[in-house]
Amino acid sequence: MQAKVNTKNFIRYDEGAERYSMSKHSFMKLAQDARAVYKINRITLVNVKIFEEYLESVSYTHLRAHET
């Protein structure tokens, strides 16, 4: 049985919170900080590529801060 690969370029807040194992509020805040949020009429979407790049940079910065 094949594992499902996450290939969507844009996701909603609920889906993102589930995918990244965090609360919806935390995901919303990180997505906004990453400037990955797109609002189209009444739909809010998060650009996964931008979000993941931001998440990697925040994680790396956080880890480097503890080395000093």
Image (cartoon, rainbow, N blue to C red):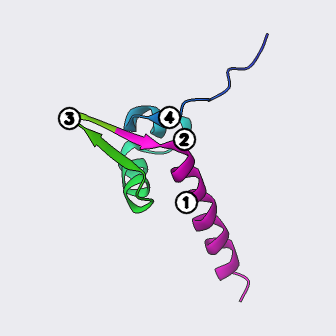
- Which badge, 1 or 2, comes first in the chain's sequence? 2
* Span shown in magenta: 45-68
- Which badge, 3 or 2, comes first in the chain's sequence? 2
Rendered residue at 63%/74% (across/down): 61
Q: Secondary structure at mark 4?
A: helix
User: Magenta: predominant secondary structure element?
Assistant: helix
- Taking 42 as reference, is 52 above or below it? below
Residue at label 2? 21
Residues at marks 1 and 3, CA–CA distance in whole angstroms: 25 Å
- Crowd tier of the residue under label 4, counting other residues whose Cα lies within 10 Å: few below 14, some 14–19, many 20 or above: few
Nearer to us of marks 3 and 4 is 3
Question: Is residue 46 in the magenta section?
Answer: yes
Q: Amino acid at mark 3?
A: Asn
Q: Amino acid at mark 1?
A: Tyr
Residue at label 3? 41
Q: Position of residue 63 (x, y in %)?
A: 68, 72
